[in-house]
């Protein structure tokens, strides 16, 4: 057959007419398959190829079956380009249903591989990677068969590479890319070089690497055989839009995406058009055109639903959720995330966003964790992709290291408790506690050496610090957890979560809400590193405790203003348990009890306050507390005339 598709089409049309006239069904099937392959490889594939698809479908219906398995396999193997454009067509669905029977039939390796290419592409686009893996495992051994055409080998490397990057195995994807290029050079053909470079672009974009994507894009442009092929142009423009977006060139990205969408629609490539719409929506969101982005996503989701394209729908819903977060509509975003991440978790998608932007994915996944959406999957995705948190406040983020300092000192490394018994770990733990006392702030090495090795000379202390730092990093199992820059040490808050940091942020908010105060106070399980006697810990411990007292008072007064006396009463009892010497909480609890007409509970609270202050400080309650008690005693005396009079307040008082 001539290499020129137009000439080939004319010859095949004549052949088909002859076979049809003589009733040669085998000839009709084979020429129709070849006509479809020729038509869908030209500039306007749907216009040229779809009429032959309809004739093939009529022939299948009319005959009821193919003349033989070999004829069926030959025809279906020629539908590769057609499957790319219209994966939802009834012929394709019927082809997919016969997959297992055809692949296990007695046909040539070449035919099996060609069918496998179409089938693997179809399952990839539907987002069913387990099915793609099954096809790949079954057919990959045939790649070593001597009788395979070079182009078939190259296309198979592309298929393997696509599966690899879609499952976030980027090194393997680039290996397949390199194997395909080597095969192309060895065979002396460059027919599929553009698609190989497009594999490289897709891999780089999904990895979030705009530099490699840009380089591969230039190679793809130079290796394009037919500049008039709108299908390839549409794919390239869609990829170029992703490259420009990751580079931050939004205007160029928008232009490329619009061109790609126009070309995809002109070719009739519905799946490609839906995919480009999702990319266009991502760009429109960055320009603030949220409504237009929503329209594009609605079209994409409708197509995904109608063709059961799970991955396409997952991507569209994630972009839609991001659009809602941009306008601070977390409720709507949460609903979209629930649907998107349910799909992603079911299929274990590790590259759910083809244009990987860590900032965007961190924002989406933080929202998911806050709302308890597919937590196990989300945490697995974060770890696998090495995402950094969008905020240090999200305790559900899978932090490599978690440090608890309130009321206890404990460390979790990769969610497993770190055991640090033994003399060799004492100094690394001391260094960690010192760094914890300064949060994310960098501390000079000299200051640390003075605090931890006050008796040692500079050189000796310096060597001791280097050794201790090495041991600490090894113990924490994360080199990046402790940063050393410009002779300053700090904990890296991208990798380390400390319980008091959220607490401090709320403490410094001028108008903290009741909810934020409650969350922060709940973290305070006791004083910071309560058992440590060092002066640098004591000063920080007292500052944190003062914040706790102030926030507890704020929260209690907010509850009282809302007449929520029961919750206020419980809150003050907890505060008394944390700090038995904080007299104001006894007084506020007495007021709550009086409001609830629980006067004897109020009396018991006063007696507890009196005893605690005297036994610990040798002092009586303050005048304000005594006056409140006198008021309480006055209310109780008519009901209990034998009750003793209130004590006098001429002795030293507490505050």
Image (cartoon, helix red, strand yellow):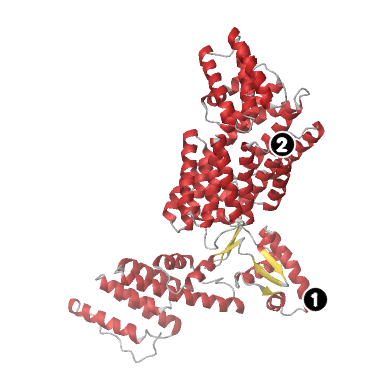
Query: Which image quarter: residue 498?
Result: bottom right
Q: Residue furthest bottom?
A: 650
Q: Residue at x 74, y 36 (%)?
A: 180
Tell me, for residue 225, which label it has, or none: 2
List x then y, in percent, for residue 402. 58, 60
Q: Residue at x 54, y 72 (%)?
A: 530
Sooner in the amino-acid sequence: mark 1 or mark 2: 2
Question: For the residues marked 1 and 2, what is the alpha-carbon distance in whole angstroms?
Answer: 67 Å
420 lies left or right of 557 = right
Secondary structure state at the residue bearing disc 2: loop
Mark 1, residue position: 459
List x then y, in percent, for residue 367. 49, 55
Residues 353 and 444: in front is 353
List x then y, in percent, for residue 415. 58, 54
Residues 85 and 655: in front is 85
Residues 49 and 186: in front is 49
Q: Are marks 1 and 2 in contact (CB under 8 Å)?
A: no
Residues 47 and 25: in front is 47
Secondary structure state at the residue bearing disc 1: helix
Residue 68 visible in the displayed image: no
List x then y, in percent, for residue 106. 67, 16
Mark 1 crowdedness (10 Å alpha carbons): few <14, some 14-19, many ≥20: few
Quarter of the image that includes the C terminus: bottom left
Residue 210 visible in the displayed image: yes
Q: Residue at x 46, y 67 (%)?
A: 520
Query: Which image quarter: residue 103?
Result: top right
Quarter of the image that includes the N terminus: top right
97 lies left or right of 243 = left
Q: Residue at x 67, y 34 (%)?
A: 159
Q: Residue furthest left?
A: 638
Viewer-nearest of discs 1 and 2:
2
Above or below, comparing residue 10 to residue 286 in the picture: above
């Amino acid at each position: 057959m001539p290499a020129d598709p137009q000439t080939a089409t004319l010859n095949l049309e004549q052949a088909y007419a002859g076979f049809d006239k003589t009733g040669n069904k085998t000839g009709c099937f084979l020429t129709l398959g070849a006509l479809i392959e020729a038509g869908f490889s030209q500039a306007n594939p749907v216009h040229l190829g779809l009429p032959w698809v309809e004739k093939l479908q009529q022939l299948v219906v009319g005959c009821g079956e193919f003349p033989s398995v070999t004829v069926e396999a030959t025809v279906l193997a020629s539908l590769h380009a057609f499957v790319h454009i219209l994966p939802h067509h009834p012929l394709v669905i019927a082809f997919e249903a016969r997959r297992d029977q055809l692949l296990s039939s007695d046909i040539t390796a070449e035919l099996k591989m060609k069918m496998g290419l179409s089938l693997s592409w179809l399952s990839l686009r539907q987002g069913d990677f387990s099915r793609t893996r099954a096809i790949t495992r079954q057919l990959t051994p045939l790649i070593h068969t001597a009788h395979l055409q070079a182009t078939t080998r190259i296309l198979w490397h592309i298929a393997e590479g696509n599966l690899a990057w879609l499952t976030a195995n980027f090194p393997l994807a680039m290996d397949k890319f390199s194997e395909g290029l080597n095969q192309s050079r060895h065979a002396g053909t460059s027919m599929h070089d553009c698609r190989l470079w497009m594999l490289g672009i897709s891999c780089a974009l999904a990895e979030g690497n705009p530099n490699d994507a840009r380089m591969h894009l230039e190679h793809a442009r130079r290796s394009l055989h037919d500049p008039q092929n709108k299908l390839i142009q549409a794919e390239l423009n869609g990829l170029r839009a992703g490259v420009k977006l990751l580079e931050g060139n939004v205007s160029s990205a928008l232009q490329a995406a619009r061109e790609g969408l126009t070309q995809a629609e002109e070719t009739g490539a519905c799946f490609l058009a839906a995919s480009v719409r999702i990319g266009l929506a991502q760009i429109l969101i960055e320009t603030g055109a949220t409504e237009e982005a929503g329209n594009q996503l609605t079209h994409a989701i409708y197509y995904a639903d109608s063709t059961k394209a799970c991955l396409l729908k997952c991507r569209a819903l994630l972009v839609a959720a991001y659009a809602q977060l941009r306008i601070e509509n977390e409720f709507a975003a949460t609903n979209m995330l629930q649907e998107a991440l349910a799909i992603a978790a079911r299929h274990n998608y590790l590259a759910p966003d083809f244009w990987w932007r860590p900032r965007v994915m961190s924002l989406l996944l933080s929202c998911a964790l806050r709302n308890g959406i597919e937590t196990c999957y989300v945490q697995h995705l974060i770890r696998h992709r090495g995402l950094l948190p969008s905020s240090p406040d999200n305790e559900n983020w899978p932090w490599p290291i978690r440090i608890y300092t309130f009321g206890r000192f404990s460390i979790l490394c990769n969610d497993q408790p770190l055991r640090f018994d033994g003399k060799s770990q004492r100094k690394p733990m001391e260094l960690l506690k010192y760094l914890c006392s300064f949060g994310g702030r960098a501390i000079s090495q000299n200051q640390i050496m003075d605090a931890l090795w006050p008796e040692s000379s500079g050189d000796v202390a310096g060597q001791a610090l280097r050794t201790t730092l090495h041991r600490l990093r090894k113990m924490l199992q994360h080199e990046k957890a402790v940063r050393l820059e410009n002779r300053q040490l700090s904990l890296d808050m991208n990798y380390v979560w400390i319980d008091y940091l959220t607490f401090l942020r709320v403490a410094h908010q001028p108008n903290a809400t009741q909810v934020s105060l409650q969350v922060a106070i709940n973290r305070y399980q006791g004083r910071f590193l309560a058992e440590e006697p060092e002066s640098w810990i004591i000063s920080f411990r007292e500052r944190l405790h003062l914040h706790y007292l102030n926030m507890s008072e704020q929260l209690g007064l907010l509850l009282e203003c809302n007449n929520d006396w029961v919750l206020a009463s419980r809150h003050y009892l907890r505060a008394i348990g944390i700090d038995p010497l904080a007299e104001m909480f006894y007084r506020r609890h007495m007021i709550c009890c009086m409001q609830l007409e629980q006067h004897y509970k109020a009396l018991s609270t006063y007696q507890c306050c009196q005893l605690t202050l005297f036994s610990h400080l040798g002092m009586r309650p303050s005048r304000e507390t005594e006056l409140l008690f006198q008021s309480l005693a006055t209310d109780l005396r008519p009901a209990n005339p034998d009750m003793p009079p209130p004590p006098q307040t001429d002795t030293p008082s507490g505050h």
